[in-house]
Image (spheres, helix red, strand yellow):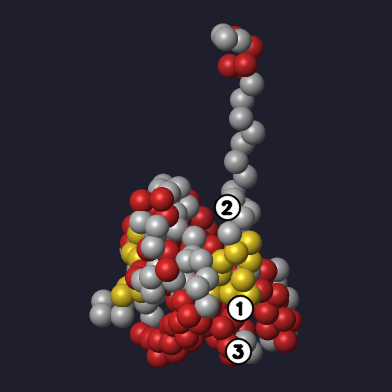
């Protein structure tokens, strides 16, 4: 049905907000105050620029130790991309996979249902969800009921768990900024640009479809780099 008046209603303008960014020293302080799985996840978000859901949804098959790379499947906008796997996290991530394999082994021995598979793959490959390759890198400690199928199975870690531990560490570090898990991703992008990384490379690592989205981080750098001096700091003129 054609409704001409509908064409006159514009979309609300998208408001660009300057992201909260931690300094390198602040990131190091926060990560140093965290421990266990949460510390590894926070370091991975900062070291690879992953979104929280992308990190939680990592499968064993998508961690490539040979190439020091992580394949992000069906990220925002249902896009795949490849990000770096920080070499400093190799040993900790291998230890996490050893723990995950033990959990996977217990589930197989108990005859539990396999993990959830995306894009109707479960119908095409009914046993794939039981394989080690498709298991979660960060499995939950408890089983839960899949709301779509009613099947009791193991999901990945709960989203709020990392956010709680991160906020505790930020408070202990005495950082007076509104920090969330996504702040680690903002800091990743800003610190790469600050180190001279090409903005197109940063765009690909973040999975942005438009470079203008990535450009928001350059606004943080313009002021932080001190490119424009304040008039208050100008040398006094001779009388």
Q: What residue sits right under mark 3 in the picture?
A: 35
**Quadrant placement of the C terminus:** bottom right
Q: Depth check: give the residue in front, 209 or 90.
A: 90
Badge 1: how crowded within 10 Å, few (<14), some, or many (20+)?
Answer: few
The vertical placement of 101 against 54, above or below, is below
Q: Residue 12 lies in what quarter of the image?
A: top right
Q: Position of residue 226 (x, y in %)?
A: 53, 70
The residues tagged by marks 1 and 3 sit, at their Cα atoms, a distance apart of 17 Å
Circle 2/circle 3 CB separation < 8 Å: no
Q: Is residue 33 left or right of residue 215?
A: right
**Quadrant placement of the N terminus:** top right
Dot 1: element: strand
The vertical placement of 66 against 230, above or below, is below
| Earlier sequence position, callout 2 versus callout 3 | 3
Q: Is residue 38 left or right of residue 103?
A: right
Circle 2/circle 1 CB separation < 8 Å: no
Q: Nearer the viewer, mark 2 or mark 3?
A: 2
Circle 1/circle 3 CB separation < 8 Å: no
Badge 2: how crowded within 10 Å, few (<14), some, or many (20+)?
Answer: few
Residue 32 is tagged as none
Q: What residue sits right under mark 2 in the picture?
A: 149
Q: Depth check: give the residue in front, 137 or 195.
A: 137
Q: Nearer the viewer, mark 2 or mark 1?
A: 2
Dot 3: element: loop
């Amino acid at each position: 049905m054609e409704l001409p008046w509908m064409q006159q209603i514009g979309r609300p303008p998208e408001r660009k907000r300057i992201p909260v960014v931690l300094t390198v020293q602040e990131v190091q302080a926060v990560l140093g105050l965290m421990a266990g799985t949460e510390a590894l996840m926070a370091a991975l978000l900062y070291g690879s620029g992953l979104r929280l859901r992308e990190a939680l949804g990592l499968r064993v098959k998508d961690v490539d130790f040979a190439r020091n790379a992580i394949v992000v499947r069906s990220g925002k906008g249902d896009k795949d991309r490849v990000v770096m796997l920080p070499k400093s996290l190799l040993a900790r991530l291998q230890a996490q996979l050893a723990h995950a394999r033990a959990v996977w082994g217990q589930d197989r021995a108990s005859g539990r249902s396999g993990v959830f598979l995306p894009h109707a793959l479960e119908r095409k490959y009914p046993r794939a969800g039981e394989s080690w390759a498709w298991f979660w890198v960060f499995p939950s400690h408890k089983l839960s009921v899949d709301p779509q199928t009613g099947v009791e199975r193991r999901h990945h870690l709960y989203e709020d768990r990392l956010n709680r531990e991160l906020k505790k560490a930020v408070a202990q570090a005495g950082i007076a900024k509104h920090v969330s898990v996504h702040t680690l991703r903002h800091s990743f992008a800003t610190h790469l640009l600050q180190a001279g990384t090409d903005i197109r490379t940063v765009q690909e690592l973040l999975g942005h479809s438009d470079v203008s989205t990535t450009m928001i981080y350059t606004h943080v750098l313009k002021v932080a780099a001190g490119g424009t001096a304040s008039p208050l700091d100008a040398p006094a003129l001779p009388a």
